[in-house]
Amino acid sequence: MKNILVPVGSSKNAISNLQYAIDLAHEVDANVYIISVFKEVSKVGGLTKLNEIMKEDSKNRIDEVMAAVDTKDVTVVSHPLKGGVLEGVKRFNKHVHVDLMVISPRSNSIREEVYLGKTSGKLVKNTNVPVLIVPEGAVYKRPKNVMMAFKNGQFKKNKNLEPLTTLVEKFNLELNLLHVETPESTPEMSMVSNKLMKINSSYKKTKNATTFQGVVEHFQQMNPDMICVVRRNRGFFTKLWEKNNILKEEFYTSKPLLVLGVQNH
């Protein structure tokens, strides 16, 4: 894990979120990149000056957040980017490979009943970058155990597991696997990749209607410091991924949530 990306918006959690990413980067020897996006308006009608002002405001926002954190000895690079946040992340990832993106559940939503806000939801749903969703205001603490829930145990591309394997190896994490068999499961899904079986501390198979229900049922027993799920085309939180806003009554966790990249097979 070399590059960690932190999109900075208007969220009140921007400072704590960036500090969390820096503290994590310090432990795994990674660089941190900060982006703040601004939407460019038409240059027709003498609006070029307005674009310059918006870019300057974006840069000032980054500087404001940067001034409030302890960068330690971590390399932190900032980039104001024009366009939407989703397009900005995708464009940035083409030039600098992002190993992990650290975001807050709510970028700018003030609705207390919301767990995952519109902007954060878009980033989780519409990029294939591994995402760590950090609880609001959370202070970094080295995790000791992770609960990984999945339906399909086949990971034919080991790179999809890299953020998880890095954390397990760096921190000597206890990895507790929860293999959820649902009515849609196939015999192939019952097999688990050797890579996972080599690094896990425990393995449990359960039958539930959905992977989400399996997490709810076994969360208290496993008592993890972090939850890990897989972003599949039709996988964990299938219904939730269909929209951007996710209410707390639909899903909520006070633990960091690691969402791995899409595994299609």
Image: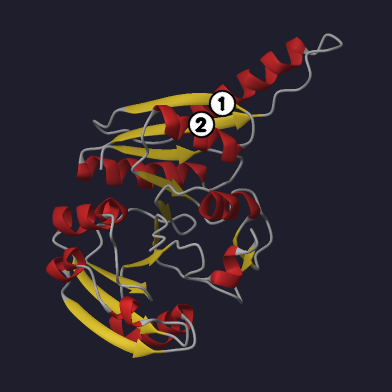
Is residue 67 among the parts visible in the rendering? no
Q: Secondary structure at mark 2?
A: helix
In front of the other: 126 or 120: 126
**Quadrant of the drawing holding the N terminus:** top left
Q: Which mark is residue 81?
A: 1
Give, as a three-letter code, the residue at label 1: Leu
Q: Is residue 76 left or right of residue 88?
A: left
Q: Earlier in the sequence, mark 1 or mark 2?
A: 1
Question: Which residue is most to the right?
Answer: 45
Labelled pair 1, 2 in contact (Cβ < 8 Å): yes
Task: Relative to 209, say whether 104 is above or below.
Answer: above
Category of crowding for the residue at label 1, using alpha-carbon neighbours closer than 10 angstroms: few (below 14), some (14–19), many (at least 20): many
Residue 222, by quadrant, is bottom left
In the rendered image, residue 107, in percent from the top left (x then y), is placed at 59, 49
Task: Relative to 223, say whether 193 is above or below.
Answer: above
Residue, disc 2: 91
Q: Is residue 110 left or right of residue 231?
A: right
Give, as a three-letter code, the residue at label 2: Arg
